[in-house]
Amino acid sequence: GPKVLQIPSHQIIDMGQMVTLNCDPVSNHLYFYWYKQILGQQMEFLVNFYNGKVMEKSKLFKDQFSVERPDGSYFTLKIQPTALEDSAVYFCASSLWTGGARAETLYFGSGTRLTVL
Amino acid sequence: QQKVQQSPESLSVPEGGMASLNCTSSDRNFQYFWWYRQHSGEGPKALMSIFSDGDKKEGRFTAHLNKASLHVSLHIRDSQPSDSALYFCAASEGSSSFSKLVFGQGTSLSVVP
């Protein structure tokens, strides 16, 4: 099936540092998402992104967070500066809009486990 | 308040048995539902979607949706040890791809050989 790749799989950084999480979405997908999961629990929506713009973000998407996809390369989530509560697994997802009046399935990567010390 | 509630929190069934998972939404804007499965160390993977009232069957998996009560269920027959995972119900308002998925808190399924 469609594959979403996330790099790195693990990242350990000191509080206050900047971190960039990278996502390579499914090649023909146009919509991109970041979700946050703590300790194998609920998946929490952070942000979605289309055509170079943030379409919607949740209250978890703090001012320290930003997303971009420059020139069709990686879709990135940047956190600057990081805080202890940012420790979690971050999942990237993508979907394809086919133009119908239905919702599309999201395809998730394997996640980046971020540990903030 | 959780907009998507799942029950039970955890479930253990014998190999070959039937597993039944439940999900209820409190938001009538949610019209589209998915079941996702997440094995340890991996990302969630869509098992099946259901958008219309009634049953939808895919192999050993059957989903049932009742839009009036906003209740969706997943039944796994002939459960296998490889079915042991975290199962999420997810809902969307739909109608466009940037309509986000809202997840329930998950049901941990253990299939015992």
Image (spheres, coloured by chain):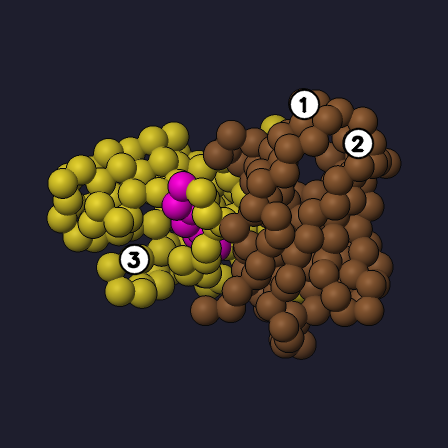
- The residue indicated by pointer 1 is A117
Q: Which of B49 and B81 is in front in this view?
A: B81
Residue B11 in sight from this viewpoint: yes
- Secondary structure, mark 3, is strand
Mark 1 vs 2: CB contact within 8 A: no
**Residue at 79% of width from left, 61% of height from top?**
A69
- The residue indicated by pointer 3 is B61
Q: Quadrant of residue A94?
A: bottom right
Type of the residue with mark 2: Gln
Q: The brown chain is which one?
A: A
Q: In which quarter of the image is the N terminus of chain A?
A: bottom left
Type of the residue with mark 3: Phe
Number of numbered discs on residues: 3
* Residue B45 position (above or below residue B70): below
Residue B69 in sight from this viewpoint: no
* Residue A46 position (above or below residue B58): above
Magenta stretch, residue numbers: B34-40
Give chain B's shade.
yellow
Q: Nearer the viewer, residue B24 or B80?
A: B80
Q: What is the spatial separation of the Cα atoms under label 1 and label 2, in whole angstroms?
A: 10 Å
Residue A6 in the image, given as x and y percentages of width and height: 60, 54
- The residue indicated by pointer 2 is A17
Disc 1 crowd, CA 10 A, few/some/many (<14, 14-19, 20+): some
Mark 2 vs 3: CB contact within 8 A: no
Sequence order check: which comes first, mark 1 or mark 2?
2
Q: What is the spatial separation of the Cα atoms under label 2 and label 3, in whole angstroms?
A: 45 Å
